Image (tube, rainbow, N blue to C red):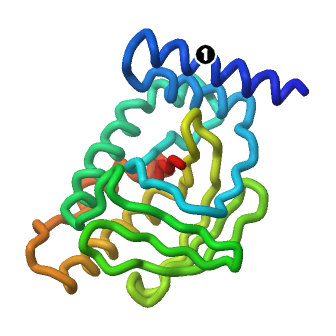
Amino acid sequence: MLVASAANAQNILGNILNSVTGGNVGETVGNVLNSVLGGGQVDLTGTWTYGGVGAAVRSDNILSTVAGNAAISTIETKADNILGKAGINPGAATFTFNQDGSFSFKAGRLPAITGTYVQNGNAVTMKFGRQLTFLQLDGTVSATTNGCKILFNGEKFMTFAQKVIEYAKKITTSYGVATVGNILTTAKSVDAGFKLTR
């Protein structure tokens, strides 16, 4: 009952702040509250719209998290730009998680990237298929005010980004040259992954 009340309060506060500011303040407050209260369990089954790269400082200390906003912003902005050059843009890509443990990721002109996943509570393991040389990412899924975030070790997520770039280059030469090298240092201090909405 306490968790349900907290989640309801979080949603109300997020909606009020979003309507007043017209920005993403509600999501920011929701994410902070989720880190304190623990977000509700998310069932990944179904189709989700990719909302961009999400990141969080690896710390249970709220003050450390707030102080790390610069690192989070750097990762999200630069990684979004890099993945955009590979044809993966917020709002124009989807993840579909099937009940049989398979998933597919479709973005722009890229052929679908497929794989398998296992979800156990808030823990999730995604193993990509041959397209990304069977890369495995272990992470956590948490609820946000408008969907969920799946976050992994930042350096491992940058490996994912690099493999997507290499895959895109094999399919077409029209994408710009990109590398994750310049943000790997920042990635060491954060978890990064996908923001998803229904």
Relative to 5, 99 lies left or right: left
Residue for point 32% across, 56% down: 92
Q: Exactly how many numbered labels are in the figure?
A: 1
Which quadrant: the N terminus? top right
User: Residue placed at 63% from the left, 69% from the top?
Assistant: 125
- Location of residue 139 by image quarter: bottom right
Q: Position of residue 24 (x, y in %)?
A: 42, 26
Closest to the observer, 31 or 56: 31
Three-letter amino acid code at disc 1?
Leu
Q: From the top left corner, tell me how far across and down residue 14 is, in percent.
A: 56, 21
Query: From this viewpoint, which residue is outermost toward the top?
Result: 20
Q: Residue furthest bottom?
A: 130
> Quadrant of the rendered structure where residue 84 is?
bottom left
x and y percentages locating residue 114 in the rendered image? 48, 80
Q: Residue 89: x and y, percent?
A: 29, 55
The residue tagged 1 is 13
Which residue is found at the position 66% from the left and 33% from the top? 34
Residue that appears at 37% across and 60% down:
93
Q: In the displayed structure, would residue 20 be above or below residue 175? A: above
In the image, taking residue 3 as reference, residue 122 lies left or right, namely left
Q: Residues within 10 Å of mark 1 (few under 14, many from 20)?
A: some
Query: Splitting the image into 4 quarters, where does residue 152 fall?
Result: bottom right
Q: Residue furthest right?
A: 1
